[in-house]
Amino acid sequence: MNTPLALVDLARLVRETWVRHVDQHVELDSTNDRALEMADSVSEAELPLLVLADRQTRGRGREARVWWSAPGALTFSLLIALDPDRLPRSHRSRLALACGVAVARTIQESLPAVPLRLKWPNDVYLRDRKVCGILVEIPGGSAPRAVLGVGVNVNNRFHSAPAELRRQAVSLREVAKRKFDRTALLVALLRHLEEQFTELCDRPAALLAHWRRFCLLTGRHVHVKSAGRQLEGCCEGIDEEGRLLVRTAHGLERLVSASIAAIDPVPQERGVL
Ligand code: BTN
């Protein structure tokens, strides 16, 4: 049995992390929707506010996709305050990169021997399958705030998932062949989120360097959809503003938003006869 997160020692989360308030639910449509609803009504003193749900019935992903999750996954949203003096508006898109590094570091600590990569902007991959998705949204209210939505496949399995997902996703449990303590993982992840947020604000170049170490796409031939265009070429990583660099036949493209349609397989080394 997975311990329901709703029964977890929530005081521990507040004691041991930067979270100031927890809004916990056994079931929610979407933790991001709940955090967005609350964004304008909670006081600064309650932030960061953690919205935690054991189950989501309508989890949302990037580009209006559905986020499917089964019992045992870790799904939460963190509502944080944004100080425009520390994080200029133009750097907000890098929040997604910071979250990706935080998740990558957390998982790497639990599974040091398994290759872990970030697929731009912030999908987290173990070997060649997605283990975590991140959805960062900026609420429309008067106070500058952000919602960092994170879904990690921890103890869930994919046997009852749609066929496409079964091929593309994986959980920590499936890789490690053991179950994980979701509370411990959540505490570690919240700490890393604080560290990476601080790095983003105070040393943005260091955050980008950190992100590059995990890049799945650098040096790979990619097929990308961006602003209604389809491009292909060799990925050269990310630039100093966090944009994806793709060297096409017509020159270097710097992409602010894009979805990676396909990544060509790494060529196998040929044997010498
Ligand atoms: C993606 O991979 O496209 C992003 C998926 C983000 C899923 C998380 S689960 C917690 C939070 N609530 C949501 O509705 N979505 C995010």
Image (tube, rainbow, N blue to C red):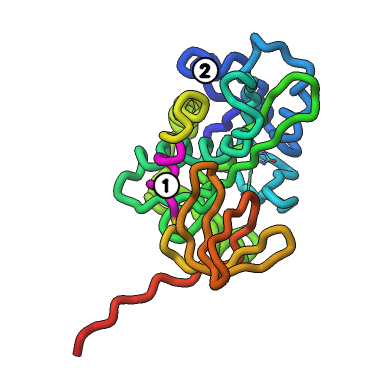
Q: Residue at x 53, y 51 (%)?
A: 120
Quadrant in which residue 4 is drawn: top right
The amino acid type found where label 2 is placed reads: Trp
Q: Out of 244 and 197, give the one closest to the viewer.
A: 244
Task: Please state the horizontal and vertical placement of residue 98, each as a whole percent of the image.
Answer: 51, 36
Tell me if mark 2 has few (under 14), some (14-19) or many (20+) residues whose alpha carbon lies within 10 angstroms of its own: some
**Label 2 SS:** loop
Bounds of the magenta segment: 207-215
Is 111 on the left or on the right of 51, as rendered?
left
Is 267 on the left or on the right of 217, as rendered?
left
Q: Which mark is residue 159?
A: none
Quadrant assignment for the C terminus: bottom left
The amino acid type found where label 1 is placed reads: Arg
| Magenta-colored segment: predominant secondary structure | helix
Task: Please state the horizontal and vertical placement of residue 11, each as a whole percent of the image.
Answer: 53, 14
Relative to 246, residue 81 above or below: above
- Residue at the outermost front position: 251
Q: Residue at x 54, y 61 (%)?
A: 252
**Label 1 SS:** helix
Q: Is mark 1 within 8 Å of ligand 1?
A: no
Residue underneath mark 2 = 18
Quadrant in which residue 207 is drawn: top left
C-alpha distance separating marks 1 and 2: 26 Å
Image quadrant of ligand 1? top right
Residue underneath mark 1 = 212
Point out the tag, 1 or 2, that comes first from the N-terminus. Answer: 2
- Residue at the outermost bottom position: 273
Answer yes or no: is residue 90 visible.
yes
Task: Please state the horizontal and vertical placement of residue 45, each as a whole percent of the image.
Answer: 64, 9
